[in-house]
Amino acid sequence: MLGKRSIDAVCVAAMLLAVLLTAGFAAAGATGAIEPDRDDAYLDRLFAAGTVHRIDVRIGDWDAFLASAPSEAYVRCDVSIDGEEVADVGIRAKGNNSLAHLSERGLTRYSLKVEFDHYRDGQTYHGLDKLSLDASFQDNSYLKTYLVLDMMDFMGVPAPATSFVQVSVNGEAWGLYLAVEEPEDAFVERVWGAGRGALYKPDYRSLDDPNLDVGLCYLGDDPSTYPGIFERARVEGAPGSQERLIGALELLDAGDRASIEAAVDVDEVLRYFAVQVFVVNLDSYLGSTGHNYLLYEEGGRISLAPWDYNLAFGTYALGRPELPDDATTAVNLPVDAPAASEVLAERPLFTKLMAHAEYRDAYHGYLELLVDGYVGSGRLQRTVRAAEELIAPFVESDPTAFVTFEEFGQGVDALEAFCLLRAESVRGQLEGSVPATRSGQADAPGSLVDASSLRLEDLGELSDLE
């Protein structure tokens, strides 16, 4: 048995060891040997579910900001988020076609980017470096992006966090927006950890260009032949990341199973494509534009993450007379041929995977999970109706809304109806009663799910801006 003096000695030694360990850990953290815990508190604050958050933008000359918005230049402002002040923040308008369409019509309800560290290096909002405020352009329901990202989350695909936000400017109401976690440092570290790879948001230069790099085609070993990827880096990877990504595209181009496994996070990509095809998003990697996706590379393997769904649910073609825009065509989009053959020929990440029965069967299994586990379980309806109830009072009083409150309700109903009809068609395609290819559907039009009662226009179209 230890005596009192021995016990005291042991206690002192233990305390000394604890002090030394604490100092050692602190030193290791300071030198980067131990990565400090990330601050993800923004998830429980701005992105907490079940409430409409509030962001007040305080800016000297809002009218001047709106007048210069098409230039997408950052302007200094302060913001208050749910009553918490953040000073010296960068804000700018965002968008591609949406920005042009709004400017042409003299409208000013722009989507916005808020960058917390634009003027103060290292400044974040509880760990968040940047966020988007989505204005619901061509989305009468206000729910398209919100719903798709919930589906992605259900399927285990890394997805940006979202929440509904009432935006005001200098204390006066401006409109209801969807806050979306920007895919930059905070997002990458939250999803993939501190020892991260590289993240890109590929985009085309012009629709008249081939844009094969954005389609993830292998174009040789020169990084300059991939400007649509490497000029669109959101988070730079470690040295050699460009060469590793090009190596992954070369392996993907080879197309055999071993090469694909070495180059692609196959399971995650298949889950991503299942949601992408289910929601009929043609303004995407599987559409003629080939963009609106996030590309992640780590250790020479690539995966995809979701971005931008205001033209999903068959609404990409609305207002474009050269494309079919009837609801029945959209609802029955073939799951095995979700784009024209000439488009799919330039989308190897889908076609190379579908060439293998094992991967195609897994993809079908994930579609079935969406149909039965997300729609069939009632999660779709609960998600849509809970969000509608939450935001309805804010939509009704939205001073810059693109649509009336009645049109908002029609949009929500149309969104739910589309998903239910789409689930019916996908189930039929998986079971064989509805053809899963374009040629098969052309030969058996009577087998298609009838969606003639659905008005895609209720989901949002350009004419709503007039």
Image (spheres, rainbow, N blue to C red):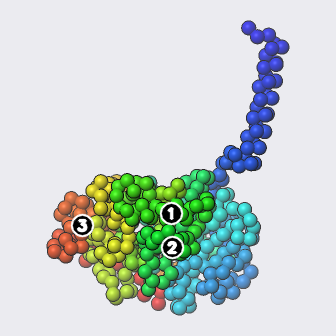
Q: Are circles 1 and 3 on residues that touch, CB within 8 Å?
A: no
Residue type at mark 1 is Leu
Q: Which residue is mark 1?
A: 245
> 10 Å neighbourhood of mark 1: few (<14), some, or many (≥20)?
many
Distance of label 2 from label 3 (alpha carbons): 33 Å
- Between the C-alphas of marks 1 and 2, the distance is 10 Å
Q: 407 or 108: which is nearer to us?
A: 108
Q: Quadrant of residue 241?
A: bottom right
For the residues marked 1 and 3, what is the alpha-carbon distance in whole angstroms?
32 Å
Q: Which image quadrant for residue 84?
A: bottom right
Q: Is residue 271 visible?
A: no
In this view of the protein, which residue sits in the foreground, 315 or 290? 290
Q: Is residue 85 left or right of residue 194?
A: right
Q: Which residue is mark 2?
A: 226
Judging from the image, what secondary structure is the residue with disc 2 in? loop
Q: Which residue is mark 3?
A: 436
Residue found 77% across the figure and 43% down from its top: 27
Q: Could you tell me residue 446's position as x and y percent?
A: 16, 73
Which residue is the extreme one toward the top? 1
Judge left or right: residue 258 versus residue 225: left
Residue 342 shows in this picture: yes
**Viewer-nearest of labels 2 and 3?**
2
Residue under the point 47% across and 70% down: 220
Q: Amino acid at mark 2?
A: Tyr
Q: Secondary structure at mark 1?
A: helix
Rendered image: mark on residue 438 = none
Q: Position of residue 248 (x, y in %)?
A: 46, 61
Q: Secondary structure at mark 3?
A: loop
Asked whether 352 or 448 is in front, the reply is 352
